[in-house]
Image: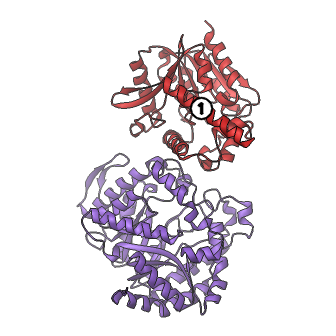
Chain colours: A red, B purple
Amino acid sequence: MLDKLKKLQYGLKVKWYEATEKHTRFIDLDGRKIQIMEGGEGEPLLYLHSAYGENLWLPFHQKLAERFRVIAPAHPGFADSEGIEEIDSMEDMIFHYLDLLDYLGQDRINIAGVSLGGWIAAEFATRYPDRVKRLVLAASAGLWMADHPMTDLFAFLRRPLRLREINFHDPNSYLAELLIPTEADEERMAAAYKAMAATARLAWNPPGHNPKLAGRLRRIKSPTLIIWGDDDKLIPTAYAEEWAARIKDSRVVKIKDCGHMLMFEGEDDFVAAISDFLGRS
Amino acid sequence: MKFFFFHLMSWPYLPDDFEKKYDSAWIWCPNTLFDPEKGSRLYNEYLDTLVYAEEAGFDGLCVNEHHQNAYGLMPSPNLMAAILARQTKRVKIAVIGNALPLYNPPTRIAEEFAMIDCISEGRLIAGFVVGGGPEYFSYGVNPTYAREMFREAHDLIIRAWTEPGPFRFFSKHYKLNYVNPWPLPLQKPHPPIWVPGVGSIETMEFVAKRRYSYMGIPYFHISVFKRTFDMFREACAREGYEPSPDQTGWAIPIYVAETDRQAREEFESSLWYFAKKLLLGIDISPPGYTSVKSALSIIKNQGKFLASVETWDQIEEGVYAIVGSPATVRDKLIHYQKELGVGNILTGMQIGAVTHEQARRSMKLFAEEVMPYVRQAQEAPVRS
């Protein structure tokens, strides 16, 4: 049984890697190399990934690509994207995405961000509201509720079991073990460490939020979809209502039996909610 | 050959079942476990022990900085050094060190070290450290800047000590229009600088380039120290020189009693207290605190770290501590000091829950019946 699982995991990994290669290109953005995955046809959708660093072409990318032209860059410091030395704050990250959208010739685009990516998307939308067509914030970081503190992700980096508990509704699922393995190989450990270091650059202090953001959310003009797992132990589900209360044209979709990693654990509902929301005229 | 008495000032009163109830003696280890009544007595006893080390014949004393933990109760080693500056007359006072990125502006370190150097009449050894991983959780300083803040703060402090003020200092993390510390250190151009390290090549190169001293941080297998000091000597060779004995130091827990058996009986529980309770959580490492390469190598070396050791035989085999009669300790120290080629031995003689009385007895035996022989052996030609 165990061997079979291992084989399956290996098989999946190989497919992901192959697909990733097919969908990945590198661009030179003012001297920094940036990794971008692209796929699908139709309306462009900028996907901003989470602190996990989902920079392989994964099933949820593929499903979104059946409806949209998915553009999924790796943030500086993640995967093979360079330029983390120039990122000291969210401000720098927003300029980075301003540069990237200009490079891609996207004047006004749909943006979906998960967790760290949601935070970046929301910050971008407060500064450049006219460049965001529709906005999707999924299990987004960026706000702080004293009554519902976020869990300190950084405290448990070398405790895979605890990490799975924080990130998944079902920490014992095959999926959870696959995404946060008990024993990772060196390559994966290195990638995870890099991802967490790049996240810490922005999210160490204040932890995972910008105290100024809440007051700026009124500037967002675009219709906004807020998606949350109903069992998010990293950024509690209560945050969904907080975002909704602060963004004028917003609605909330919650995914049942789903933790923080909703693009994996709630994959179908996640994709359906985005497709439904962006598909409206 | 110089002998330093290195104190951590550990909290010795953690409950027996501590490691079953708690997952760390650091960061979030509840401070309700700290009892100020006991703490008050403890600080005074620990300081007495440090003062006694001068009387016993040690060449220097070491104190260091840790925050929010049971492992070491010196959030401010400079306070301890200031007391020792007044209460001792002869010994070097090594603060190893101040965690540079935790001070903003780091000019504070230039000032406090200068005060200690003046008060002690030039006996300060100034230690600079990045600070342990847990400190970045406790102080909220962004760990992804740890290394660059360390370097910038170092440059600021050295310039503050050597360049007439006022001057302007602008770096990425520190922007000061007026750097002009009063007082300045007594030692010229500045006090000797020691940098403790766990084996990262970046730190060694930093130290080698500036001809500072490199202190090997304890609690690793002897093979790790061997490799570390070899690497340091190679780093110096690349800078075109051979390091002097003063430039290397080996920190090692030591306990001496009349016989080997007695030494082990008295010391073993303290060592396990240290390894299983106080070291619990010392490895909680924030992301970006080291390079990816260093982070992976730390994980790989985990098996050679005292916290992973389970038996007394492993302690002996890996030389995690040197424990025994004066003759045993003498032989081992002479052997390993030569093998490592170090000029400073930083003895940890009151680690874990070693009591005040035990420490005194062990120090006395060590000073009278070990130190002179090791000094003599070091001066004698090496026999092969």
Residue B275, picture quadrant: bottom right
- Residue A232 image offset from top left, x and y in percent: 70, 35
Q: Is B354 drawn above or below residue A123 in the view shown?
A: below
**Residue furthest top as drawn:** A281
Q: Is residue B185 left or right of residue B346?
A: left
Q: Is residue A72 left or right of residue B248?
A: right
- Residue A120 image offset from top left, x and y in percent: 52, 29
- Judging depth in this view, the residue of B92 and B225 nearest the camera is B225
Chain assignment, label 1: A
Q: Identify the residue at image location x=45%, y=89%.
A: B371
What residue is disc 1 on?
A115
Q: Quadrant of the C terminus of chain A?
A: top right
Q: Identify the residue at image location x=36%, y=78%.
A: B123
Query: Does dot 1 land on a helix, a strand or a loop?
Result: loop
Q: Identify the residue at image location x=47%, y=23%.
A: A127
Q: Identify the residue at image location x=55%, y=61%.
A: B67
- Residue B255 image offset from top left, x and y in percent: 57, 83
